[in-house]
Image (cartoon, helix red, strand yellow):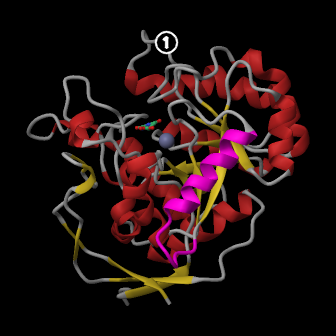
Amino acid sequence: MPFDRIVIRRPDDWHVHLRDGAMLKAVLPFTARQFGRAIVMPNLKPPVTTTADADAYRGRILAALPDGVSFTPLMTAYLTDGTDAGDLARGFADGVFAAAKLYPANATTNSAHGVTDIARIAPVLERMAEIGMPLLIHGEVTDQSVDIFDREAVFIDSILAPLLERHPTLRVVLEHVTTSEAVQFVRAHAASGRIGATITAHHLLINRSHIFQGGIRPHLYCLPIAKRETHRVALVEAATSGDGPFFLGTDTAPHTVTAKEAACGCAGCFTAANALEVYAEAFEDAGALDKLEAFASLNGPRFYNLPVSEERVVLERRPSVAPDLILVSEGDAVLPFRSGETLRWSFGGTV
Ligand code: DOR
Ligand code: ZN
């Protein structure tokens, strides 16, 4: 019996970029419409590095929420070589921080202030392990001589595996996994209960050939970059398994059309405008709609030791058209993933 209507606990998005200012105002309603909570990335300019920064940013997010929408931003700290472990621990104890994010310096957008050598933050990681604060990792090496399609797999071998050995109780989320190596690694450590992985909607649907289909498609360029089809298949298998370590994280990363369609275009796919519809397509294609709730609404809260949502949302199998350009400021806009295309599923709101 095909599903024509699915009701699931309201999902959370365990990896979003909400930005700030006019962009925040433009994109936040999309995330808050579908998701009850979201882990908010700290790579603003300048980055969110202290408890005070995060508290102020959380205030700006709440102020930008449309009236009557219930949504909880979960804040993260941007780790630098100079992170103050005391401030981080206080922010976690006070409920300001849900986690801390490791950007290897210069790995991706706004990561110039990131960590230059993981050994430098060993005392911070020790403290995080002690207090149970999760470390969220952008898992790519920054050595430009490593092929861009290999940077995640090399990171896992050369940095992540030794890191887990050095810090045997540290809880880690490998963010936006894109390779079968990442899936295998997470599965190999699953029994410890201390590793999770987010998977984006776009990495479930595109492989690297899509980025060059008929010409260069800058709106499909993100980091980590989409890999070969075999890797996409491994990600679909992981997401649709319903297994505990794998949970939803869109990595929705809005950039203006001007910034995307440039000689040196920014990395990021803006998927917040139709995230659940697109995930539903991927799960339906895999014959696994019955696993969507585990991936979207149950596994993440379990990892983060948070209650599952008591709200419910509905998805219906009726065509919806992904929104067109979303205006950010005069003369600039963001283009949603699959803009203008017809999607098979519609988001029916909370029930
Ligand atoms: O594609 C990406 N965009 N990957 C990241 O890691 C950062 C993000 C952004 O902030 O635009
Ligand atoms: Zn991201």
In depth, the one of 134 and 18 nearer the eye is 18
x and y, in percent, of residue 242 in the image: 58, 65
x and y, in percent, of residue 284 in the image: 36, 72
**Residue assigned mark 1:** 143
x and y, in percent, of residue 204 in the image: 38, 53
In depth, the one of 204 and 116 nearer the eye is 116
Magenta residues span 51-70
Q: Residue at x 60, y 47 (%)?
A: 57
239 vs 52, left or right, is left
The answer to whether any part of residue 71 appears in the image is yes
Q: Residue at x 28, y 37 (%)?
A: 208
19 vs 102, left or right, is left
Principal SS element in the magenta part?
helix
x and y, in percent, of residue 138 in the image: 56, 34
13 w.r.t. 307: above or below: above
309 w.r.t. 165: above or below: below
